Image (tube, rainbow, N blue to C red):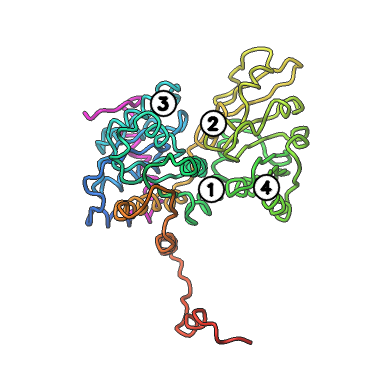
Amino acid sequence: MIEHDVKDLNLATAGRYKIEWAESQMPVLRLIRERFAKERPLNGVRVSACLHVTSETAALMRTLQAGGADIVLCASNPLSTQDEVAASLVVNDEIPVYAVKGEDNKTYYQHLNAALDHHPQMTMDDGCDLVSLLHKERPNQVAEVIAGTEETTTGVIRLRAMVKDSALKYPVLAVNDSMTKHFFDNRYGTGQSTIDGIVRATNILLAGRTVVVCGYGWCGRGLASRAKGMGAHVIVTEVDPLKAIEALMDGYQVMPLMDAAKVGDVFVTVTGNKNVIDAHHMAVMKDGAILSNSGHFNAEINIPALEAMSADAPRQARPFVQQYTLRDGRKLNLLGEGRLINLAAAEGHPAAVMDMSFANQALGAEFMRQNAGALAPDVYTIPEEIDREIARLKLHSLGVTIDALTDEQREYLASWQEGT
């Protein structure tokens, strides 16, 4: 048996069924896998991947493996692992996996180090923890890495901070910045899966409730849209005036979070920042308010401040619902320990959305393997032609055809002489 640390290998059969279900809804990735199996573009490349260990991620790992990659996978979040999927990858695909749902912080970093023990030539990150740990604690290994990819908005922000500090030592592809990733995954995927996680955790009716969405990036847009569609009254809070006016024009009420804190029933942070919901906000919230986060790290809600405001230790009101009783008697409900609620209490994005995101990962890995030698240490965006090809393949898989420019139209768009 290959090296691993998963909850229970006896879950492998259930995991295989779950992976097969996801792959049935990922036609673009299946097409890429067929080509990868023939061409082997990643043949012999050691890849260390730090991603949410879900059935969709398993489909990506199997695609990279078909392309010849030598893979090790660890979890990018302590609560996002699907234990049956982790078991299946070990038993059925012989991919070393280090991931257990609910692992503590010490185990989480042990798993990151296990992935780096693979001496990767390519990193595949979801939040930049693997890249950060490699640069900070294993600088002697950095020269072995030719390139990397990054899946998330939070990770790209951290990578660009590394570039600014001249700390990043190899090129990384910002998969998150491609249109077929952030435009669909962040908006439609996060929008639906966050609502799914909140409802699974609480079983509340959203219709008639006031939902406060903190942040109006692509994730916030999708979340606000889905909450409104379920009958909620949506308030958006923002620090960016451009995004704030967009939210206003999209039909949402916009106000400072301190004002929203007094009237909100459900709060969701999707900013990628720290202490977005802080002690002074929680001090004025209604009894029974629900606090959740769908940003990558559990820093968006100031949990230590919530603990300090509480009279006693929280009680587990429901799975993934920690109920804090404050000294004044009010109760605040924290979902999923403040971690990504769509993965902590639900299954993350639908496979049909991750089909495009992981197509970006697979083709991005191929692109970086082919071009890494010509790229300086920096953060790069996936080429537009790859982005468009993924969209074309997705349309094709859905049986949708679109128009094409005529020769006359191409010539017109390429010229400047013809006017009014």
Give the amino acid type for the residue marked by disc 2 in the picture. Answer: Arg
Mark closer to the chain start, 3 or 4? 3
Is there CB contact under 8 Å for labels 3 and 4? no
> For mark 4, what is the residue?
240
- Viewer can see residue 82: no
Q: CA distance from mark 4 to mark 2?
A: 24 Å
> For mark 1, what is the residue?
186
> For mark 3, what is the residue?
108
Is there CB contact under 8 Å for labels 1 and 3? no
Mark closer to the chain start, 2 or 3? 3
Decide: is 411 above or below 251: below
- Specify whether residue 22 is painted magenta: yes
> For mark 2, what is the residue?
339
- Position of 124 with respect to 413 (left or right) is left
- Disc 2 is placed on an element classified as loop
Q: Residue most toward the front?
A: 166
Q: Which residues are magenta?
A: 1-30
Q: CA distance from mark 1 to mark 2?
A: 16 Å
What residue do we see at 32% from left, 26% from top? 5
Q: CA distance from mark 3 to mark 4?
A: 34 Å
